[in-house]
Amino acid sequence: MDLRSKDAKWALALIIIGLLALLDGFGAIDLWGGFWRLWPVLLIVWGFSMLRKRGRAERHEGRRVFGDTVETTDSPFVNHSSAFGDISISIRNEEFSGGSASTVFGTISLDLSGVARITGYGQLDLHAVFGDIAVKVPGHLPVEVRSSSVFGDVKTPGGGSFDGKTYRSPGAAQGEKTLVIDCSQVFGDVEVVTAE
């Protein structure tokens, strides 16, 4: 993001004005002496949306700031991270080796429904702060979901065992190569569903 551009300067000014007005609204500072309480949130949201919609999302080797990642790939490996943006990836390869994805203030959506078998490492590490994680897996694939959640729920497909921290689909413990999904999220939900 080029902070020298006119729009970026306006966006940052709106964010700063919004934060100052919000602090004033909660009595931390006395900017306007009891003016409206929550209208500054609109300025903050407006500023962030201006930065995000600029189309100048910075991306370096799978990392993105202020922008969404939407990708369909033949790669058997996933490696993405994002701040203030969503990650949506569909794997078209029949073999999947694993990888990682992480986001802050965003959602991770992975479609693995076309995967036929697990090769290599076979572990998928997913991390979200203030965001949700959704993974679609094929019904025939053995899956183990490990989750550590703070202020969030974990939803897994039926037919397996779930003890609150680990879910194992039928067939996951029978020696077949298993997809291990290790999720950690704060203020967000995890949902693993099977493809129809």
Image: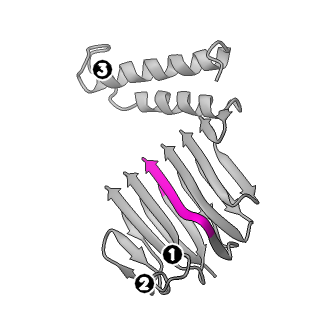
Dot 2, crowdedness within 10 Å: few (<14), some or many (≥20)?
some
Please tell me whether residue 14 is drawn above or below residue 190 in the rendered image: above
| Amino acid type indicated by mark 2 | Gly
The answer to whether residue 127 is magenta is yes
Q: Secondary structure at mark 1?
A: strand
What's drawn in magenta, residue-wise? 119-132
Distance from the alpha carbon under mark 1 to that under mark 3? 50 Å
Q: Residue furthest left?
A: 27
**Which residue is identified by label 3?**
24
| Residue 57 left/right relative to 125 | right
Q: What predominant SS class does the magenta segment belong to?
A: strand
> Are discs 2 and 1 less than 8 Å apart at CB?
yes
Q: Secondary structure at mark 2?
A: loop
Q: Residue at x 40, y 66 (%)?
A: 146
The first of marks 1 and 3 along the sequence is 3
Q: Nearer the viewer, residue 106 or 7?
A: 106
**Which residue is identified by label 2?**
160
Q: Residue at x 53, y 79 (%)?
A: 142
| Amino acid type indicated by mark 3 | Asp
The first of marks 2 and 1 along the sequence is 1
